Amino acid sequence: MNEQKEISKLTLRDVPNKEYFMWGHGACPGCGVAIAVRNLMRIFGPDTIVYVPASCLVVFGAQYPISAFDVPYFFTAFENTGAVLTGIRAAQKRRGKHSLVVGMAGDGGTFDIGLQALSGAADRDEDVIYVCLDNEAYMNTGIQMSGATPFGAWTTTSPAGKVIRGKRRNKKDIGAIVQAHGVPYMATLSNAHWNDFVRKAEKAKRAKGFRFLHVFTPCVPGWRSEAAKTMEISKLAVETGMWTLYEVENGEANVTYKPKKMAPLTDYLKLQGRFAHMTPEDVNSLQRWVCEKWWLHYKDEVEAPQCEVFKVEKAVAHDGDPLHGV
Amino acid sequence: MVTKVLSADHAVAWAVRLARAEVIPAFPITPQTLIMEQLSEFINDGEFDADFIPAESEHSVMSIAVGASAGGVRTFTATASQGLAFMHEMLYAGPPNRLPVVMVNVNRSLGAATGIWLEHNDSMPERESGWMQVYVEDSQEALDMTIQAFRIAEDRRVMIPMMVCLDGFVLSHTVERVEVPDQYDVDKFLPKFAPLNVLDPEDPKMINPIVPPEYAMEMRYQLDRAMDGARSVIGEVDEAFAEKFGRRYGGLFDRYQIEDAEFALITLGTATTTARRVVDELRAQGKKAGLIKLRFMRPFPESELREATKELKALGAFDRSVSFNSYGPVFTEVRNALYGCRVKVTDHIGGLGGRDLTVDEVRDMFANLERCARGEKIRQVTWYGLRGEQK
């Protein structure tokens, strides 16, 4: 990446073509995590050390004796990304080295089991980049509900049952939790908003201190979506307000992309089997949450757009094959 | 060399400073905290150049430690009891990756019937984690062994993390006269850390990816052989240390009055001091009592113990922890090592939950062992200092 170029002028064209997360990995077609990691690694470059906690990435990214990462790679456990990064960084400092130390954790490894280590590293303002690859459930273990799962979504531990239909709580606002530590940089990214993605990743790379990149990464088997629709879903998540693109730099919040008007939530939901069972009431509950978020980030009072609530014959249930979509 | 009056915790802090550990993640837990307090004082006063990382939990402490060790620097930490249990998962990250972290565990009882006092039930379950484990008897040995631990763990033939266990309060908070070696001599004794595998973009490596069944078993075997090979390195380092500093600990275990002994006790940690006094009394009465001070639980000195105990008639294992409805871990290991040997091995449990192990109780142990040596039947397991009837 051209280090002289102003960050706001960077585009996809500035990203080097050299791959450091290479071909041959075992991710599903359309995997949002693989797309995000590949492009993050092109931006981070060769002088990078990667730590991956338990997640899909640990399984499809490297298995002895082969690795898709062409940089040093380390794994130990699930809940300790912030801590292991701290240790690697400390060793770098002692040895007078300045490699980029990057952790790539899933949403479970960040929102839930890894929250304590994340908080510790953020609190100490460790000089590392923490990437959260958010596919909104424990996908590696077979689609279980996490703190990142949105309201109403089906998972194997929030099944669409006869009485309780999908998750009953809203997605945890991990961005606000990280910001509350007063970290120098945090941003939300989407695979479908390229130039925005590039600028935020490069900004994180150039900054010092604890940097948090929260990436929206659709999961084809977990979301019951089509591989070809990963980008469309990513785009619709932003247009509907399910995902908001912003950054917080030294305490100053900045919305980096604002949709012209709120798209109907159902445009997003209907592409994913995990929402297929939702009742009009549940869609409205989710819409309320989206409207509040919209106001929080865009400072716009919006009237919720007319949602076209769809009906399916039978609720989605896990058929035992993790690769089956709907 | 200077002589100081130090608790074992403070002696350990001196050892870590002299060993020039570079990264020290820590989380407070009684009775370990004095180590970390002293180390942070050294660092903040500019007397010791290391990175002290106040982590948010023991789990994170060990995660930071393996990260730093994989990053290629000498790493130290200390913990106790619940803290050790909390880092249990991460203990398993060090050995197969051959990351020679050194950690002091200040033994303290673990779990309900909660207390902060001495018991060995925190470190004993970690025998399976792949860490070496040494138990020390006094503050001097705590200092000396912490320095030696780095040399043994970082030896290219070993490359396994080591846990130095010392008895909570009895040692950690009790001051003794301790000889603190000169930095110059320690630098001569302990070479700079030369890591085996380092996370370094100049030479990219993956450390600890998922390992499929086709390879994992060989990695376990390599670790098993390295642990076995550590036995001779421990002896070598003990000799080298004795040459430099004049103090010898016997390596895997130490012998006291064992050559012509008919009955003996095998002890860990501070119980050894009490038992040595009782052996002296019995010897003065012309009784052939002996003592083995077991130092290492991992690697376990199986063949060495068979050799050392072959003339004995009765051997008692002293255990400061117990596996319920089974035996104490020292007994289990010792009897296993001596399977098929002539000597009768019995289990002697005492001092649980921090209860004082008295000289009288140790006298009772030896009295029982003497009867056993005469061919009388004694209990397989005896608890000492227990109120009420022993069924």
Image (spheres, coloured by chain):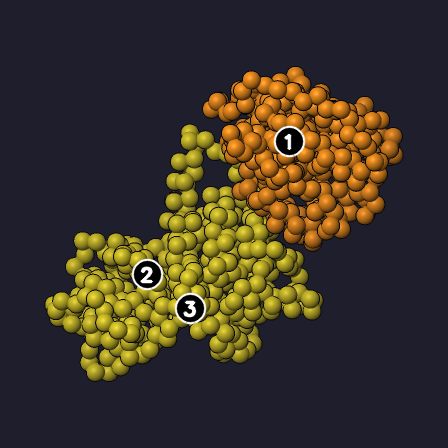
For the C terminus of chain B, give its image quadrant: bottom left
Residue at (47, 24) in percent of width and height: A320
User: Is disc 2 surrounded by few (<14), some (14 to 19) or many (20+) residues within 10 Å?
Assistant: many
Identify the chain of the residue marked 1, using the numbered disc in the image: A
Residue at (73, 50) in percent of width and height: A180
Q: CA distance from mark 3 to mark 2?
A: 13 Å
Residue B390 lies, in percent from the top left, at: 23, 69
Q: Hue of chain A?
A: orange
Residue A187 lies, in percent from the top left, at: 76, 38
- Amino acid type, mark 3: Leu
Judge whether residue A203 can be spotted in this image.
no
Find disc 2 in the rendering and name its residue: B322
CB under 8 Å between discs 3 and 1: no
Residue A90 lies, in percent from the top left, at: 65, 51
Same-chain check, marks 2 and 1: no
Q: CA distance from mark 2 to mark 1?
A: 55 Å
Q: Hue of chain B?
A: yellow
Instruction: For mark 1, give the secondary structure.
Output: helix
Identify the chain of the residue marked 3, using the numbered disc in the image: B
User: Is disc 1 surrounded by few (<14), some (14 to 19) or many (20+) residues within 10 Å?
Assistant: some
> On the picture, is A298 further left or further right than B380?
right
